Image (spheres, rainbow, N blue to C red):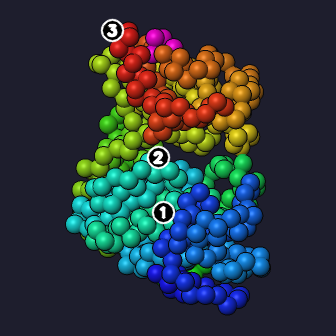
Amino acid sequence: MRLSEILKGIDIKNSYEDVSVLDVTQDSRLVKEGSLFVCIKGAAFDGHNVAEEMLGKGAAAIVVERDLGLKNQVIVENSRAVFSMICANFFGNPADKLQLIGLTGTNGKTTTTFLLKQILENVGKKVGLIGTVQNMICDKIYPAKYTTPDPYELQKLFRLMVDEGCEYCVMEVSSQALAQGRVNGLRFALSAFTNLTQDHLDYHKTWENYFKSKRILFENSDIAVTNADDENGLKILEGLDFDKVVTYSVNKNDATYVAKNVTFKSSGVEYELVGDSIGRCSCPIPGRFSVYNSLCAASCALTLGVDFDDVLKAISKSQGVKGRIEVVPNGGRDFTIIIDYAHSPDGLENIITSLKEIAKGRVVTLFGCGGDRDKTKRPKMGKIAAELSDFCIVTSDNPRSENPSEIIKDILVGMQGITTPYEVVENRKEAIAYAIKNAKKDDIILLAGKGHETYQILPTGTIHFDEREAVAEILSALD
């Protein structure tokens, strides 16, 4: 592909040689003969510092933000901002051939995207999915490194979706991806808001920055679907123009779609879905948050024109998502083990509250907090777990470069003065073993924080750690 084709629609500040380009990258480790290397300044590394070296490795050209006095340089105002457009041009702008459906919010994105994909596929649509657990093109699964991939991987997935005949791409859009411009240049046919609570302040620094990054999605959307029960649900849309705004709610009768007469069961949730029509919605995923997740998915599907009855049928047949209120096989024992990704104060509160509604015995919460992340969450999560659970086991999550015991100390601050009994077991596998060995009849053991992850990031490096395997090994040793 010619360089001029890759730079189409981008404001260039200098003249350049229209060379042939074989690939594009912002990663200096991936530069090869014929690559276009985009120099981006990050928190720890500035691509401009190795620009000359990349040309020596065979790069056909370099994109820079300032004149480096090098041959084959292309000067732009903001290289990070244009990288997404460069990748889109390189892959032939595949997103133009898809209806992009974006979901953002603190909690619920993963389950809601899976539900929406299943609804659309139930009426014969070909759908791609991009998210935290995995990426999918129809029924083909591709591994996911980030909730929202970097621009190159994102556009590559779009290209594969188009080649496979997909009509829709349903994707989780993270606040970091929005802040970093990973979806720059994309136009979403519909975007949906789930909720907004404290998360990722280690990156965004302030709540205002976190909120503003989420809002970027709706600045680039034609239709907005939002949670009217969340105080930020309408605020995030203020001052923006849409072809249509759709609201969903459990508490407000004036929303476009309302869930009424909600019933909670151990097998799922049921409610009357009230909109232009009325029907009984049965979602086989237990928990109060499943009402909101399924209601959001239904609202999106109905807004996209899916028949009301088809939406209800699809939700009733929906399957759970790995690491989201996932019941782990326990060999027929008289207690239940559940894995859930809850790793924020609000997420932990939601899952414990939901389990309390269906529990016959104790809710035993095993949890920790990630290292090198927002430290203010730690005492909050400790307080929530202690106030809502019947017993707590405080352990390690992904400590990263931090000492796990120091993270645990921060958690315990929030548990002071609360009478709920707890145990500290720093090693996570040993903590799970403790929970299982001390389980009582009808207990629900909640393993919170890791969810779908099959690894643990320790100060010494990343190790393989799958809680499903850990549970199986521990139970086998007890037999």
Looking at marks 1 and 3 on the same chain, the residue that comes earlier in the sequence is marked by 1
C-alpha distance separating marks 2 and 3: 36 Å
Residue wearing tag 1: 153
Residue for point 39% across, 70% down: 159
Residue at coordinates 43% horizontally, 20% vertically from top-left? 443
**To which quarter of the image does residue 423 belong?**
top right
On residue 479, which mark appears?
3
Query: How far across and how far down the image is residue 172, in percent?
Result: 49, 59
Crowding at label 2, few (<14), some or many (≥20) Cα neighbours within 10 Å? some
Q: Is residue 251 visible?
A: no
The magenta stretch spans which residues? Answer: 434-438
- Distance from disc 2 to disc 1, alpha carbons, whole Å, reads 31 Å
**Residue receiving disc 2:** 289
> What predominant SS class does the magenta segment belong to?
helix
Amino acid type at image mark 2:
Phe
Tell me the residue at 54%/19% (across/down).
Answer: 431
Identity, as a three-letter code, of the amino acid under mark 3: Asp
Spatial CA distance of label 1 from label 3 is: 45 Å
Look at the picture and state if 87 lies above or below 198. Answer: below
Specify whether residue 122 is in view.
yes
SS at circle 3: loop
N-terminal of the pair, mark 2 or mark 3, is 2
Q: In this rendered view, identify the residue nearer to me: 306 or 6.
A: 6
Around disc 3, counting alpha carbons within 10 Å, would you say few (fewer than 14), some (14 to 19), or many (20 or more)?
few
